[in-house]
Amino acid sequence: MTGREVFWKLANGQVYQQPFTVREGETMFDIARELEAAKFMRAGDFLFAAGDPALIRDLRRARRHSKASSSLPPMNFPGILRPAN
């Protein structure tokens, strides 16, 4: 599935929620191990996706062309994970 396809699924509410907590200070390698241990996805798949800046560019491009973009929160990718409010 491309970043664009993921964006449109989210924008159209086609989601399946599964809680997963990323604790402050965890690296992408820690996250990858925990995702695999919880049987969400293979660690290598996560690391590949996390290291691919094209996926973020694809999401930003899809968002620019979305009618739903005004109702979505801003997309900020500062390079760190921020705690949820």
Image (spheres, rainbow, N blue to C red):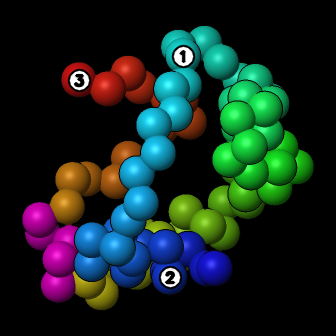
For label 1, the crowd category at 10 Å Cα-Cα, with few meaning under 14, some 14 to 19 and many 20 or more, is: few
Q: Residue furthest right?
A: 44
For label 3, the crowd category at 10 Å Cα-Cα, with few meaning under 14, some 14 to 19 and many 20 or more, is few
Q: Position of residue 68 (x, y in %)?
A: 17, 77
The residue indicated by pointer 1 is 23
Classify mark 2: helix, strand or loop.
Answer: helix
Residue lying at the far top in this picture: please name it.
Answer: 25
Residue 70 part of the magenta segment: yes
The residue carrying mark 3 is 85
Name the residue rendered at 17%, 84% in the picture. Answer: 67
Type of amino acid at the residue the image marks with label 2: Glu
Is residue 13 inside the magenta stretch?
no
Given residues 63 and 26, the one toward you in this image is 26
The image quadrant of residue 9 is bottom left
Q: How many marks?
A: 3
Residue that mark 2 sits on: 5
Label 1, label 3: how far apart the Cα atoms are:
14 Å
Magenta span dominant secondary structure: helix
Q: Residue at x 20, y 72 (%)?
A: 69
Figure quadrant of residue 23: top right
Amino acid type of the residue tagged 1 in the rendering = Arg
| Magenta segment | 67-71
The amino acid pointed to by label 3 is Asn
